[in-house]
Image (tube, rainbow, N blue to C red):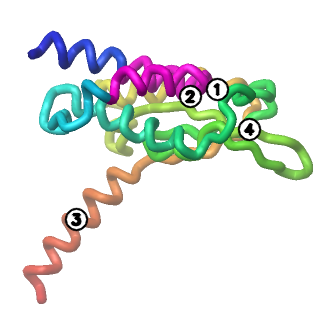
Amino acid sequence: SDGELNTLAIWFTVVKLLYLKGLLQFIPPLTALIEPVRVHQRLHLTLVRNEHAYYTLISQLMEYFDDLRFLRPRLTPNESLYVFGDSHSLPLAWKSFKLQGKDREIRPVLATGVKAWHLRKESNFYPKYAFFQGAESIPNNSQVLFIFCEIDCREALAKAVEEAKDKY
């Protein structure tokens, strides 16, 4: 029913928010409750398909974290490398590494569905606002890796291939 789908969407979103905030230790107990209800459902064909896609991605990413009891954001925001983008930014999140001899941690900043077209001055579509909200959430003078416009490339590539078929 619509009510059941909306309830699932809320829980999917809770999992996404926990992941974005680095509160990974709370995700496995939730997925243990969600999975029996979710499995074998055709949720990709429903109005909650986007929430379901993020949930599924995060559930799969959680398999790569070892001991969640000790995993939480360890470094201050200024010691982090921010990865700002759509869902493609999530696999990089919460990894630690050294950069120029300093410990760094990757923190995700999510802005879903942003295309270059949305960022033009006259645009009024929600991804533009998500982009600017995400940008404002990053502390000043932070190091940021931007991962945007894959959608633009994918759509342009598909169009170019389709047009090329007619020429050859």
Name the spot of residue 17 as percent of width and height, x first: 48, 21
Q: Which of the two discs, 3 and 2, labels the residue nearer the N terminus?
A: 2
Q: Amino acid at mark 3?
A: Ala
In this view, which residue lies farthest toward the right?
Answer: 101
Q: Are marks 1 and 3 in contact (CB under 8 Å)?
A: no
Mark 3 or mark 4: which comes first in sequence? Answer: 4
CA distance for labels 3 and 2: 30 Å
Q: Residue at x 83, y 49 (%)?
A: 98
Q: Which numbered disc flags the more N-terminal residue, 1 or 3? A: 1
Q: Amino acid at mark 4?
A: Glu
User: Which span is picked out in magenta?
Assistant: 12-35
Write the residue at 39% across / 53% down: 150
User: Which dot marks residue 138?
Assistant: 1
The secondary structure that dominates the magenta segment is helix
Q: Local crowd at mark 3 within 10 Å, few (<14), some, or many (≥20)?
A: few
Q: Nearer the viewer, mark 4 or mark 1?
A: 4
Cα–Cα gap, marks 3 and 4: 35 Å
Is residue 106 left or right of 3 when viewed as pictured?
Answer: right
Alpha carbon separation for disc pair 2 and 4: 18 Å
Q: Residue 48's x, y, as percent? A: 22, 26
CA distance separating discs 2 and 1: 6 Å
Q: Which residue is mark 2?
A: 135
Which amino acid type is marked by label 1? Ile
Q: Helix or strand or loop: what does disc 2 sit on? A: helix
